[in-house]
Image (tube, rainbow, N blue to C red):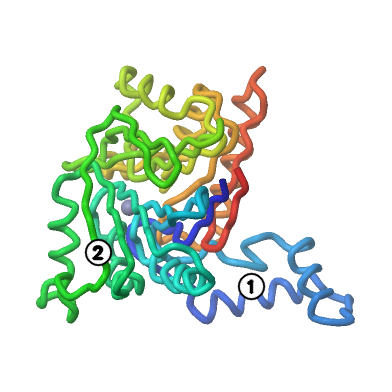
């Protein structure tokens, strides 16, 4: 399986201002002081290897959308945040080369940042495309229709030309889709909850768990998550806040922390963790700092366990599982 991140930001799409990009260029020039480069490739290699990620790149600003390439018969996508726009453009290119126009979409919950990309998803406007939207929420269809009502959007949902189907799944009842065995877990998030997904194929497992609050006092719920994450090759986890934020300032906002994510992955024997759903107020430097802190924390609490590899997801990241 190959996992591709099209949108990794939480809550609201963001883009860096001109000043932020200028500061990155200036920092890179300072680091390169005295160096000269024969060509662009050499300069690119220097920037990638000798400067930090927050200097030579950006985590990106599109909201939640992640693709799992597992089966040549269908596209598999988690969430429909603003990253779905770019995924749609890319998918049409692949369809032109012969990829079937079947899309399985798995929705964590119908909050705006997780559905806002759908009206800009070009395959939805294509006759002959089939889009199956899997959700734990029975009113996912109502949410998608509502955001395209005339008061909010110029193109009504009814005029989309693709065949769009909605399937509601109860948690803890695995099903098959796109060559994957899929199971859901209900997660605490605001008043209406959200759903995490576990995808399995050929002995490999990917878990997508975003917009989930983990209360330290609810040990039963944490046990259920340890089982859900068990032995996963990759866990994509909402780490919008640091633990300090999650237990004080941001309590009850429905999000996890980097510390909770590491603890759960350790307890579950997961192999890799991708930090996801980054705080929209966070600069690239802020997110990178949180990433470094997470690496240090993982090392500190690892004990006798094998190392948990921690990645910090960014728009455009691809991970082979
Ligand atoms: Zn969200």
The number of callouts visible is: 2
Residue at image coords 84%, 74%: 42
Along the line of sight, which residue is nearer the eye, 77 or 104?
A: 104
Can you identify the residue that label 1 sits on? 24
Q: Nearer the viewer, residue 121 or 273?
A: 121
Q: Nearer the viewer, residue 112 or 207?
A: 207
**Pointer 2 residue:** 163
Residue 194 in which image quadrant: top left
The CA span between labels 2 and 1 is 45 Å
The C terminus lies in which quarter of the figure? top right
Task: Say which mark, if any, is on residue 216.
Answer: none
Q: Earlier in the sequence, mark 2 or mark 1?
A: 1
Mark 1 is surrounded, within 10 Å at the Cα level, by few (under 14), some (14 to 19) or many (20 or more) other residues, namely some
Which residue is painted at 35% across and 74% down in the image?
Answer: 122
Is there a contact, CB below 8 Å, between mark 2 and mark 1? Answer: no
What element does badge 2 sit on? strand
Q: Is residue 212 above or below residue 107?
A: above
Find out if the beta carbon at label 2 lies less than 8 Å from the nearest ligand 1 atom. no
Asked whether, in this view, residue 17 is left or right of residue 174, the answer is right
Q: Is residue 242 above or below residue 116?
A: above
Using residue 116 as the reference point, say whether residue 301 is left or right of it.
right
Residue 164 in the image: x percent, y percent? 24, 61
Image spot of residue 117 (x, y percent)? 32, 67
Q: Position of residue 238 (x, y in %)?
A: 41, 44
Q: Secondary structure at mark 1?
A: helix
């Amino acid at each position: 399986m190959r996992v591709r991140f099209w949108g990794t930001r939480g809550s609201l799409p963001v883009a860096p201002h001109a000043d932020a990009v200028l500061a990155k260029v200036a920092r890179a020039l300072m680091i390169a002081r005295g160096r000269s480069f024969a060509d662009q490739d050499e300069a690119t290699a220097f920037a990638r290897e000798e400067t930090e990620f927050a200097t030579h790149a950006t985590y990106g600003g599109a909201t939640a959308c992640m693709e799992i390439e597992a089966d040549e018969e269908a596209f598999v996508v988690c969430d429909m945040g603003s990253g779905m726009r770019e995924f749609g453009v890319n998918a049409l290119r692949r369809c032109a080369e012969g990829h079937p126009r079947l899309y399985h979409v798995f929705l964590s919950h119908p909050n705006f940042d997780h559905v806002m990309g759908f009206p800009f998803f070009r395959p939805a406007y294509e006759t002959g495309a089939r889009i199956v939207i899997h959700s734990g929420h029975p009113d996912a269809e109502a949410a998608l229709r509502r955001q395209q009502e005339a008061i909010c959007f110029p193109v009504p949902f009814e005029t989309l030309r693709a065949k769009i189907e909605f399937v509601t799944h109860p948690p803890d009842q695995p099903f098959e889709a796109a060559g994957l065995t899929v199971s859901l877990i209900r997660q605490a998030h605001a008043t209406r909850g959200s759903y995490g997904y576990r995808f399995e194929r050929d002995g490999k497992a990917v878990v997508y768990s975003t917009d989930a609050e983990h209360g330290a006092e609810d040990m039963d719920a944490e046990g259920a998550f340890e089982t859900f994450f068990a032995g996963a090759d990759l866990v994509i986890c909402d780490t919008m806040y640091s633990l300090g934020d999650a237990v004080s300032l941001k309590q009850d906002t429905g999000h996890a922390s980097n510390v909770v994510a590491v603890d759960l992955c350790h307890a579950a024997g997961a192999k890799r963790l991708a930090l996801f759903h980054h705080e929209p107020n966070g600069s690239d430097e802020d997110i990178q700092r949180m990433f470094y802190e997470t690496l240090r924390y993982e090392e500190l609490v690892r004990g006798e366990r094998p190392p948990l590899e921690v990645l910090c997801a960014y728009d455009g990241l691809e991970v082979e599982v």
